[in-house]
Each structure stands twice: as structure tokens, then as C-alpha cells.
Amino acid sequence: MDQVTGLRCRECGREFPVEALHVCDFCFGPLEVAYDYEAIAATVTRERIAAGPRSIWRYRDLLPVDDAAPVDLGAGFTPLVRADRLAAELGLGELWIKDDTANPTGSFKDRVVSVALTKARELGFKVAACASTGNLANSVAAHAARAGMASVVLIPSDLEAAKITMTSVYGGTVVAVDGTYDDVNRLCAELTSEHPTWAFVNVNVRTFYAEGSKTLAFEVAEQLGWQAPDHVVVPIASGSQLTKVAKGFAELGRVGLLGEVPSVRISGAQAAGCSPVATAFAEGTDAIRPVKPSTIAKSLSIGNPADGWYALQAIRESGGACAAVTDDEIVEGIRLLARTEGIFAETAGGVTIATLAKLAAQGVVRRDERVVALVTGHGLKTVEALAGVVRPTVTIAPTLDAFDAAVGSLSGLDGASGAPGAADPVPSTVTPAATTQEEPTR
Ligand SMILES: *Cc1c(COP(=O)(O)O)cnc(C)c1O
Ligand SMILES: [Zn+2]
């Protein structure tokens, strides 16, 4: 099916052919993929989607690709988990976690990279490149390996160890740059003109890359039985994901997969150490002032977000909010999600959960809403964030006496107070001494 009509400038509306273009050469506005929604509506059905692969590629009719085989490691169709225990802690009613830790390289970036490299290969590119805060690097290196493409990945040199390893292992060229992400990104923009034959997934093929985030909205709706949620909480780095989640829900309405164009409130989540969008929201201005990031949420550390303004508009138009949380709150958010739902998220997930908690406490996210929180990356990628915070409850000699002496004294582990199915059989007081300052026992 030929579902794409071209690229369109988000500012002046001028149309461009489907090429590796990302800015309007008339007004410098960003370009967006334009679709023939009538043609899509005439073809796409819930049954056609259900018969597709269990990946983002079941939504191929709404993605900007031709019929070629995708560059695919199986991104998408991640679990949507009903989170009643977390909801109870936050005073919410119906809460769901979209668990994107389950993607092939452990983050939502697999969605955007799978689309970007599929399109890049279609357009004849042989080299995949990017500037990354970490997760994009992991995903580009992995998908390039899968596609047999060369890769050149640029990252800030102070990234978490796991993210550096998870990029380098795939055998591409990994360039660690002594600078912030914004420095790396600027360098990448210069390299794009030097190397026009390289597909920079978040620069010259960004228009296609961004569309991959729509699949989060598609999946959430399908997994809710083709219903839209009332409120979605989305972390913000460049702001691309948030704008495309909004676009995704709107498209489902336009092509007839939901009864009507749904009204979904979209709220944004940032770290206080890098919160240009949340600050603009709080001040009620349109101007996003760039910042120099300083937070443990490195995957969200974009001080000058390319789509920040559009994210802000999407938040306001939807009736959502945007808030920021401290590094301590991020760590608490990670632990809360792990403790209540068994999902271990990276710092970006901590940002989402802590922001959800804050917005729930303020009454912005409401008890009568069906809420979805996007948990976008796996906790093993950022174990540094928990160093000294979580550790074994006790360390003992390998004897029954030692066990009884140490663990027998902990209340709540035996039948009387912890019958199967009873809430919280392990009281939070015995979780690894969170409030003390001791070093972890290893
Ligand atoms: C990149 C990233 C985001 C945000 O993506 P943007 O589209 O740049 O706003 C969120 N979570 C994780 C884990 C990421 O790696
Ligand atoms: Zn324009």
C-alpha cells in the first residue's frame, strides 16, 4: 500500500518528496511524514493488525515504509501491565504500566530505530549513525548489526558503563566524546553535511525515526481492547516521543480504529536537573530556555530539546501537565515500581513513576481516569543510580544458626501475618536498609 503522500513542513505546510530531509529549506521548520488517511482507512482493520507480527510491524500500514522486509529485532508489542498495587500506593484507580524494558535492547528506542533503519535501507544508505544519550546508541548498533550495515555512534564519554558496553559489543564504530549530549548532537549535525551517505537516525532520517514512537499509542489502544486511555504519562528528552504518542492516538481515530478521535490527556515527565519543558510549562511561557543538564537520568539529558516546543503544545492542547522530579525522587520511583509491580526500570522510568506520583498527589492525574505510564528503559542499564541504595538485607555465614539469628528475627515472613495472597508479606521495614548510610555488602 502507498500510504505516504510525502513530507510536510510543520510550520509552513510546504510539501516535499519522501527523501532523507528533516528541515524545510524555505522556513527551516521540521518536516513530518504526511499520510493518505482515506487510503489507510479503506485498508486497515483491527483484524488485519491482529493477524500481523507481534512487533511494531503489525502497524506497518501507519508507518512510513514500503513493502520491503523491515530491519527487525522484534521491537514492540511489549506488555501492558495492570498495576493495582502501585495504583493503591498512589491513590489512583485504574493504572497500567507500558513495559518497554522488554524491548530487544531494553528501551523504547528500538521502536524508532527499527523504523529509521528500515527506511534508511530503502533509501539506499549503507551506514547507520547517531548522536545518543545511550539507549539510542545501543539500539542503532544492534539494529545495524542485524541489517549488516556499518554503524558510527557518538556518545558522551561519561555514560553509564552498561550503555557503553551495550553499544560497543555489536562491533560498530563507537566514538565517545568529552562533552554533553548537546555537544555531541552539534558535532553530529556537522558530520551530516560531511557524510551525506550516512543515515543519522536522529538527524537526516529523523522524520521517519520519529514515527516509530506512534506504535506506543497503537499498542496501548489495542491492548486495552481498542480503547484509548484517559491520561498517559510520557518522559521527555527531545520531546519527540511525547508528540508522536499524541499523533498516534489521533491517527487511530482518523482511520477508524477507535470509535472517534479520542481525547487523551498527555503529561510530560522530566528530571529537575534537565527540565526545560517542565519549566516552560510551570511558567506558562512558550519559550523553552536551554539548560546544562545535571541529573542521574542521563537518557533524558537533552538540555536543548529539538521537539520541546511541540511537546509543550501537545501537553497543553490535551489538557495534560508537565512536572520535574529530583534525583532522589527518581531513585524512589525506580524502587517503588520494582517493589510494587516487579518491574525494574532505568532512571527514565524512575522519572516517569516519580512524576506520576507527584501529579497524582496534586490531583492532576485523577483517580477516575484510566492512566498509562510509559516505562521506557531497563534498570540494568543504569545500576549506578542504585549504588549504595539497595543491597542484600543481611550477609551471613552459611549455617542455619546464622540464618535464624539474622532472618528469624525479621517479622512478617511466617504464616500468621503473611498468608498467601495477603498484601505485602514483607513489611517495607525489612527491605534493604534504605534509610541508613552503610555501604552495600557484596
Ligand atoms: C530517548 C529516551 C526517551 C525520550 O525520548 P525523546 O523522544 O527524545 O523525548 C525516554 N526514555 C528513554 C529510556 C529514552 O532512552
Ligand atoms: Zn516550512
Image (cartoon, rainbow, N blue to C red):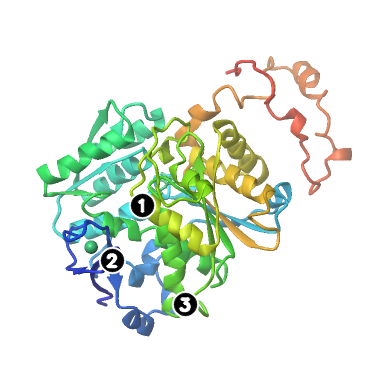
Whole-percent x, y for residue 1 in the image: 27, 77
| Residue 181 falls in image quadrant | top left
Q: Is residue 263 left or right of residue 216?
A: right
Q: Which mark is residue 307?
A: 1
Query: Which residue lies at the image location 16% right of the left edge and 59% below the top edge?
Result: 25
Does the residue tagged 1 have its C-beta within 8 Å of any atom of ligand 1? yes
Say what secondary structure mark 2 lies in.
strand
Q: Can residue 71 be seen?
A: no
Q: Disc 2 to disc 1, how far (Cα)? A: 15 Å
Q: Amino acid at mark 3?
A: Leu
Foreground of the two, 161 or 290: 290
Q: Earlier in the sequence, mark 1 or mark 3?
A: 3
Which class describes the residues within 10 Å of circle 3: few (<14), some (14-19), or many (20+)? many
Q: Return the residue at label 2.
A: 33
Say what secondary structure mark 1 lies in.
loop
Residue at the extreme bottom:
42
Q: Amino acid at mark 1?
A: Asp
Viewer-side label of 3, 2: 2
Q: Disc 1 to disc 3, how far (Cα)? A: 27 Å
Q: Amino acid at mark 2?
A: Val
Placement of 74 over or under 183, stated as above or below: below
Foreground of the two, 268 or 73: 268
Q: Earlier in the sequence, mark 2 or mark 1?
A: 2
Viewer-side label of 1, 3: 1
Whole-percent x, y for residue 36 in the image: 30, 78
Placement of 65 over or under 38, stated as above or below: above
Q: Can residue 122 be seen?
A: yes
Placement of 63 over or under 338, stated as above or below: below
Question: Which quarter holds ligand 2?
Answer: bottom left
